[in-house]
Image (cartoon, rainbow, N blue to C red):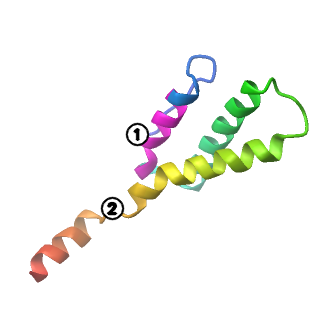
Amino acid sequence: MKTSISKSRLGRNSVLAAMNDSASEQDGGDRQQRIATAAYYKAETRGFEPGLEMDDWLQAEAEVDAAMLPLRGRPTAARSQAAHDDN
């Protein structure tokens, strides 16, 4: 299930919440879109002043990856069942 995000309707906190809600379904392209959306809001907050695009992107990338980190460590159902069966 993909979450579509409308930049005109959502604020930065809503974007980050949306990233957390579906981070477990994320693939490389979806991660890229989340980073781009977060970077857009960073640029918007500073008035789209040129020259700081890379900073916006790198900060957004760090935020997206940090939001995903807790979800990456969750065991899959198969691993959970295997661990349970071993006990």
* Quarter of the image that includes the N terminus: top left
Tell me where the magenta segment starts and ends, as one range. 14-24
- Give percent across and percent down for residue 5: 55, 28
Left or right: where 42 falls relative to 30: right
- Give percent across and percent down for residue 66: 52, 53
* Image mark for residue 7: none
C-alpha separation, residue under disc 2 versus residue under disc 1: 14 Å
In the depicted view, which residue is nearer to us: 17 or 25? Answer: 17
Residue identifier under label 1: 21
Residue identifier under label 2: 74
Residue 11 among magenta residues: no
In the depicted view, which residue is nearer to us: 56 or 5? Answer: 56
Q: Which amino acid is tagged 2?
A: Arg
Res 37 quadrant in image: top right
Q: Main secondary structure of the magenta part?
A: helix
Left or right: where 27 falls relative to 47: left
